[in-house]
């Protein structure tokens, strides 16, 4: 039985939610997020917020889906109220990034520059050509964009050169000895 699904999501003032035809819509002013929910999950509305439970309480899988759905909706509520942010850093001699409209051009030590198209809903700021800050109200989209940027040049296991997330510990290997 999922303890996460039973935990209530407090809906702040100014945030509206609507659940129709298996799709939940969370909005706060002009910020709107939509998510389709699993058909086996039911929403329990209370005075102060939302909680979730499975339609069929017999299996563990149903409770797990209820917990996953609760986490997704909680991220949507946090997204429309506060938003999410990920900081990336380019580590390496000559590694840099620059904006060109909705494109980010990465120079990562290859024979050609990598051009990365930003999807709608992502805001980016680049400081000193090596520090990248990504902001969005959609946590799933933000994480995927950051993962795609890091995949352009994964951090090297020996020197740590590449595109990496700020604050993430990178364990470096020791060089080979004779």
Image (spheres, helix red, strand yellow):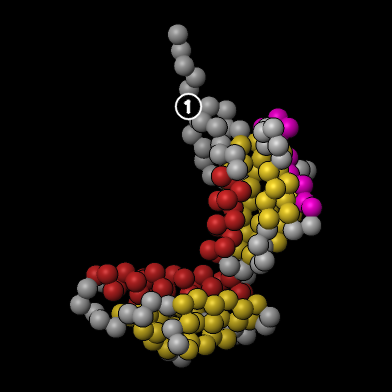
Give the image quarter of residue 5: bottom left
State the extent of the magenta-drawn residues as a range. 92-100
Residue lying furthest bottom: 47
Residue lying furthest left: 58
Instruction: Tell me if 134 is positioned left or right of 57 in this view.
Output: right
Q: How many numbered marks, from 0 up?
A: 1
Q: Is residue 93 magenta?
A: yes
Residue at 68%, 43% in the rendered image:
114
The residue identified by callout 1 is 173
Q: Quadrant of the C terminus?
A: top left
- 151 above or below 44? above
Q: Quadrant of the N terminus?
A: bottom left
Q: Is residue 42 visible?
A: yes
Estimate the x, y position of residue 81 in percent, counting from the top left.
61, 74
Count neighbours of disc 1 (C-alpha within 10 A) and say few if under 14, some if 14 to 19, many if 20 or more: few
Q: Is residue 128 magenta?
A: no
Give the image quarter of residue 152: top right
Estimate the x, y position of residue 106 in percent, counting from the top left.
70, 43
Secondary structure at numbered mark 1: loop
Residue at 58%, 76% in the rendered image:
33
Residue at 61%, 78% in the rendered image:
32
- 114 above or below 58? above
Q: Is residue 130 visible?
A: no
Estimate the x, y position of residue 10 in percent, counting from the top left.
49, 80
Estimate the x, y position of residue 160 in percent, counting from the top left.
57, 32
Between residue 111 and residue 52, name the one nearer to us: 111
Residue lying furthest top: 178
Residue at 61%, 74% in the rendered image:
80
């Amino acid at each position: 039985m999922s303890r996460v699904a039973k935990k209530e999501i407090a809906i702040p003032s100014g945030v509206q939610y609507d659940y129709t035809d298996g799709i939940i819509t969370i909005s706060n002013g002009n910020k709107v997020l939509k998510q389709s929910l699993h058909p086996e999950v039911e929403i329990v509305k209370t005075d102060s917020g939302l909680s979730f439970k499975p339609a069929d309480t017999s299996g563990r899988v149903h409770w797990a889906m209820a917990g996953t759905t609760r986490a997704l909706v909680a991220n949507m509520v946090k997204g429309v109220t506060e938003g999410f942010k990920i900081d990336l850093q380019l580590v390496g001699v000559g590694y840099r990034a620059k904006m060109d409209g909705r494109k980010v051009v990465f120079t990562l030590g290859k024979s050609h520059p990598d051009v990365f198209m930003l999807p709608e809903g992502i805001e980016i700021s680049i400081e000193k050509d090596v520090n990248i800050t990504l902001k969005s109200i959609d946590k799933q989209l933000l994480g995927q964009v950051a993962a795609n940027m890091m995949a352009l040049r994964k951090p090297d296991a020996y020197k740590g050169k590449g595109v990496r997330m700020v604050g993430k510990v990178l364990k470096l290997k020791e060089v080979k000895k004779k």
